[in-house]
Amino acid sequence: MRIDLHTHSTASDGTDTPAQLVRNAAAAGLDVVALTDHDTTRGYAEAVAALAGLDRGLTLVTGAELSCRLDGVGLHMLAYLFDPDEPELARERELVRDDRVPRAKAMIGKLRELGVPVTWEQVARIAGDGSVGRPHIAEALVELGVVPTVSDAFTPDWLGDGGRAYAEKHELDPFDAIRLVKAAGGVTVFAHPAAVKRGQVVPESAIAALAAAGLDGIEADHMDHDPATRTRLHGLAEDLGLLATGSSDYHGSRKTCVLGEFTTDPEIYGEITRRATGAFPVPGAGGRAGA
Ligand SMILES: [Zn+2]
Ligand SMILES: [Zn+2]
């Protein structure tokens, strides 16, 4: 059973529509895929509808990746199987999303001050229907020949946390995120907690504090963790009593990773579905991979 618990669609900064993502997940041989767009659940309906057209079983796990900040360090919290209509968490997602356009415009302004001829029109075209984010601006920088790849834009020189063209946005305190997601019946997994190439990461002591506050798991297997880091994170999860997941963080053609590049152990996935009460995995055609 192949389980990928972290993907993005055009509802945020991926390049596959939610329906294409579901079809590509089935074609990639996945049995379970989680849709975890940044701070939004608006891809759900299209993804669920696309399950009906599949010729093999694929189970959809609904989720989101929440933008958080702790002691000045940005971090991402994956939230699974929460009730998307629970008002308090929905309001927080809205606050983050409402901030995306002014924030993107602020970063474009800083880039222009640095002499980069990027425009809002260019970034808006790249973002299309998706909620605009740093990867869209990064792609504009690639188009303009400023950097060779999207990841090269996520550095202190450009759009990395605290970088020359970086602008802050509304973010959740991760302790609040854990509390809100739990109150909405969901499960939390700290995304790529040691992805040092994205910028500063929180210390292990902070992960321990989050664990004590009810964090369910950490994403140990991720493309931004080298093998030694993955081993260390599996050990940390064991020490702290956390679930250790693995996922691709697929963004379609915007990033190089492929669906199922890293996967989650079926027992860990089973535990996530047992803990969740806000929503249930949606079995697709065949449905043999259901919880
Ligand atoms: Zn992330
Ligand atoms: Zn992600």
Image (spheres, grey):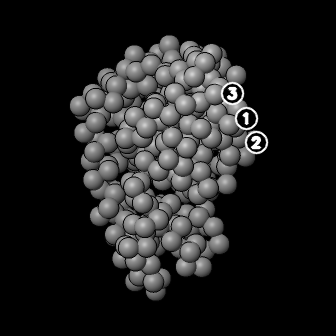
Q: Residue 241: x and y, percent? A: 57, 20
Residue 262 in sight from this viewpoint? no
C-beta proximity under 8 Å, tags 2 and 1: yes
Quarter that holds the C terminus: top right
Q: Secondary structure at mark 2?
A: helix
Residue under the image location 66 percent in, 41 percent down: 259
User: Is 258 rendered above or below residue 58?
Assistant: below
* Cα–Cα span, label 3 and label 2: 20 Å
For the residue pair 172 and 201, the one nearer the viewer reads as 172
Q: Mark 3 vs mark 2: which is more N-terminal?
A: 3
Q: Is residue 236 rendered to the left or right of residue 11? A: right
Q: Secondary structure at mark 3?
A: loop
Q: Image quadrant of residue 57?
A: top right
In the image, what residue type sits under mark 3? Arg
In the image, what residue type sits under mark 1? Thr
Residue under the image location 65 percent in, 26 percent down: 56
In the image, what residue type sits under mark 2? Pro
Residue under the image location 37 percent in, 73 percent down: 120
Disc 3 target residue: 2
Disc 1 target residue: 231
Residue 39 in sight from this viewpoint? yes
Mark 1, other Cα within 10 Å: few <14 / some 14–19 / many ≥20 = some
In the picture as drawn, the residue positioned furthest to the bottom comes out as 115
Q: Is residue 234 rendered to the left or right of residue 284? A: right
Q: Residue 271: x and y, percent? A: 55, 16
Disc 2 target residue: 227
